Every structure is written in C-alpha cells, then in structure tokens.
Image (tube, rainbow, N blue to C red):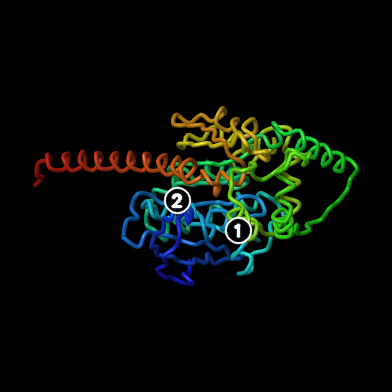
Amino acid sequence: MTILRSEIVEQPIDRATGRTGKFVKEVVLVRGEVPLSMVRKRSATGRDDRATVLLVHGYGQNRYAWHLPSRSFVNHLANAGFDTFNLDLRGQGRSRKYGAPRPSVLAEYIEEDLPRAFAEVRAATGRDDLFLVGHSLGGLISYAAAPLATQSLRGLCTIGSPFHFTQGSTILRFLAQVVATLDKAGVQVGNPTLPLRLVGRSLSMFRGYLESPLYPFKLRGWHAGAIEPEILAEHLKYAFDLASLPVMLTMFRWASGAFGGSIASKIDGLSYAERFERCTLPLLVIAGTGDDLAPPDSVEPAYLVSRSADKTYRELPLGHIDLLVGRDAPKTTWRMVERWIGDRAAKLKNERVSEDRVTMTGLSGQEDVP
C-alpha cells in the first residue's frame, strides 16, 4: 500500500445544518496488477478507535456516492470516531485514473477487489475490527465476499441492495425478460462502456419532469422531494461514473432468483447466495420504501435467508440515492449505521477485555515450576 497524499482538512459533514469536522485525509493506492484507490478519513482530534469501516459504492458510481462537498456520510463516520476507508472499485474514480480497467465480469469485484481491500485495510490499521458497508451493488458483492473473510470482518451492513434483483419492480422485470430474449437469440454485446456521467447530467436537467405527475415510469433513483436540488445535482455530477454493460446484464440474468444465480463456486461448491445464507456475521439490512431500483421486496430476502443470530432489517421512507445523501439521511440512515456498528464494536471490545482479565487471572494463579 502506498499513501499518495496525507493532509489535515476541515470539511462539511452536512452543510444544511452547518456541521463540520477536521479530518486526517489520506489518498491510498493499493498496488498490483489492478491498482485500487481508497480515501482514508479519521478524526483529527484523535478519536478514531471505535472501529474500522470500509465503504463500497454501487453500480456505475464511485467514492463520491458516500462523500459530497455538501453532505458526507464518510465525514459523519470519521467524526463519530471510526477509521473510515472509501473504496473506488476497479474502473471507477481514482482506481481508473491509476490504471485499473473496468470489470469484464462481476466476479472480479468479489474475488479480487474486495479481498485485496480487506487485506490492505487490516495492514494499514493493524486492527481486526473491520465492518463492511455497501450500497446497492456494493452491498451485493459484499454479500458474496464477506463469507470468505470472516476472519477479517466483524459485521456487514447493506443499504438499498436488491438480493432478489427486479423483485417488486414491474419495469425491471420487463427489462430482465428483454435481456433473456436477447440471450436466447445469441446477441453478443461485448464490453462497452456506459457513460453514466452523461446520464447524470441529463437527469439533473430534467429533474422537474422526472418528479412531476407527467412522468409515466416508476423508475427514479430518488424519491420525489426527499433530496434538495443542489444536493442531488452534486451527486449526479460527482458520484455518477462510467459503467460496464456486462456487469449490468449479469444482474438481469440473475433476476429470476437470489443474487449470484445457481452457479457453484470453485472454492466450496456453493453459490454466492448459499454461501451468504450460511454466514453468521452480524448483519444490518436497510431498505427504502421510496426506492424504485431496489424496492423492499427485493432487499428484505437477504435478511430473511440469513442464518446470523444477530441480524436486523429496517425500512426508511427514502429512495435509492437519498438513503445516502437525502435530506433525512443524516438523522436516519447515518445514525442507524453508526449506532449499529458502534454497539457491536463496543461489545467486541468488552469481550476482549473480559478474555484478557480471565487470562491474566489464570496466569497470576499459576505456581512457579522449578
């Protein structure tokens, strides 16, 4: 791991409320055949010992999904005492700038990017209290990668992640049928780049129409009225990135069942979904009742199938984007994630203190052996 830049910055947490914080910011490069970039944030006050957090953005997005100039989930977590790493997956954001190509298959995120990120975070911090937080596709690849890293992870949180993609959405189900029809016809699409940046600019220009009663489709990335125009404009400008068409098509091909389909892994013979079901990591699943892209019907199944003894499911009256940066996100999603991780991190520390006391008591009670 290489630290490209380290500085102390003072940045907004939520400009709408005037909340700011002072942070240690490091731009981190994970070197390798496919370079990856992360931005590490910690409180400059030295309060960074609650736990370590790794954030994973969604499809066609980048690290700015978690950090806008006016509203930053990253800064909220860092200010609350978490050592926070914000990852750009391959082909996105700074990772692309440093030479990482866009993915040719979705499995590259799962089997290469996240395991490398886990290892680098642990090497950088020297700690084993890492919590994984993913939004949308970031949550789905976390479902698949987390069970293989239970020695490194202490909990998993997903936000608006459709475990049964297209479930609860008539339009997305129709698109999945279109993809199936094209596959049967043998249509080949290659690996073109989808310029979601341009899509973001278009959405920003037509926001008024998209939120009006005249817009006929229930397929928006935000819930009408739940995010201020200037915040939405920032998100569409900074967080929308380039995307890989094969990754999106893979999602639609898996739409008939759980995430990952039924293809068995070479590692243990289990599908992604089966492996996740057997994972016992603490789990928090958050859905938005105003989310057109990941309705609760598609998100809740992850909670229902999980065998974790510590699992929580919550629904919030928000859309896909406003779950992260909407007007109410700071007092709903952000606080929920912060408290959930904080409670489990505190419990983990208490358990370790108790174990250390038992060990010391046992040692002190031993007789000297000549």
The image shows residue 155 at horizontal and vertical percentages of 45, 41
Q: Nearer the viewer, residue 80 or 207?
A: 207
Whether residue 270 appears in this view of the structure is no
Residue at 76% from the left image edge and 46% from the top image edge: 249
The image shows residue 193 at horizontal and vertical percentages of 76, 59
Cα gap from disc 2 to disc 1, whole angstroms: 24 Å
Q: Which residue is mark 2?
A: 53
Mark 1 Cα shell of 10 Å, populated few (<14), some (14-19), many (≥20): many
The image shows residue 317 at horizontal and vertical percentages of 57, 35
Look at label 1 and name its amino acid: Glu
Residue at 61% from the left image edge and 63% from the top image edge: 93
Residue at 49% from the left image edge and 72% from the top image edge: 4
**Image vertical order of residue 340 relative to residue 244, above or below:** above
Marks 2 and 1: which is nearer the front? 1
The image shows residue 203 at horizontal and vertical percentages of 72, 53
Look at label 2 and name its amino acid: Val
Residue at 42% from the left image edge and 39% from the top image edge: 340
Q: Secondary structure at mark 2?
A: strand
The part of the image, by quadrant, that contains residue 302 is top right
Mark 2 Cα shell of 10 Å, populated few (<14), some (14-19), many (≥20): many
